Amino acid sequence: METTCEEIQMSLPWLINGSLKATERVSVYAHLSRCAVCREEVSFLVSLQEAIAPKAEEQPAVTGMDTQLLFQAILEKIDQDQEEREPIQPVHSPRNEPSPDVLALIQERYRDEWDGFRNRLEPAMEDLRAFARIVRSLTRLAG
Ligand SMILES: [Zn+2]
């Protein structure tokens, strides 16, 4: 079931203010990874929010969203790394293709948090890659 740009853009304000449900967020990001028009809309809404929000004020909604988005982005990055290493045997469908544009968008939006996150997550990502390699070799044995 394909989500239309219109449907996506209607959910974007809730995505930006952090109140979109996790399941919907995943499908919005899947769409954003493929759709430049909707990514433009996100950039616009984010800059709008920044223009409206008082600079010094805390934005707890954004922090709540942050962890989810970064986690999602990191999973996509891992997928991407896997694909680069073994292009012949992708284990996931093309619909879940990685989205470097979305990653870049998130990195730009949350640059400070991103650095902190990355420092803590590098070791975890190594574990995940090792785990993925084990799963892959088991899959091959089964196949
Ligand atoms: Zn779209």
Image: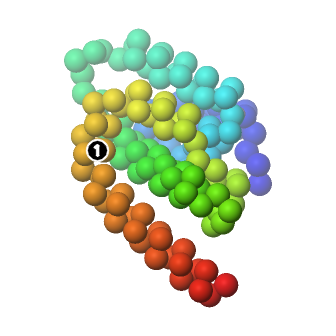
Between residue 139 and residue 30, name the one nearer to us: 139
User: Which residue of the protein is positioned furthest toward the top in this rendering?
Assistant: 51
Q: Residue at x 42, y 63 (%)?
A: 129
User: Could you tell whether 20 is left or right of 40 in the image?
Assistant: left
- Judge whether 108 appears above or below 65 on screen: above
Percent across and percent down for residue 68 are 41, 49
- Quadrant holding ligand 1? top right
Between residue 14 and residue 91, name the one nearer to us: 91
User: Could you tell whether 82 is left or right of 112 in the image?
Assistant: right
Cβ(mark 1) to ligand 1 < 8 Å? no
**Amino acid at dot 1:** Phe
Percent across and percent down for residue 136 are 54, 74
Residue 18, visible in the rendered structure? yes
Between residue 52 and residue 130, name the one nearer to us: 130
Number of residues whose C-alpha sits closer than 10 Å to that of mark 1, classed few (under 14), some (14–19) or many (20 or more) = some
Does dot 1 land on a helix, a strand or a loop? helix
Q: Residue 66: which quarter of the image?
A: top left
Percent across and percent down for residue 135 are 50, 76
Dividing the image into 4 quarters, which one contains the C terminus? bottom right
User: Could you tell whether 59 is left or right of 11 in the image?
Assistant: left
Percent across and percent down for residue 9 are 65, 31
Between residue 30 and residue 137, name the one nearer to us: 137
Q: Residue at x 55, y 18 (%)?
A: 44
Residue 22, visible in the rendered structure? no
The colour scheme used to paint the residues is rainbow
Dividing the image into 4 quarters, which one contains the N terminus? bottom right
Q: Which residue is mark 1?
A: 117
Q: How many marks?
A: 1
Q: Residue at x 43, y 50 (%)?
A: 74
Q: Residue at x 24, y 27 (%)?
A: 58
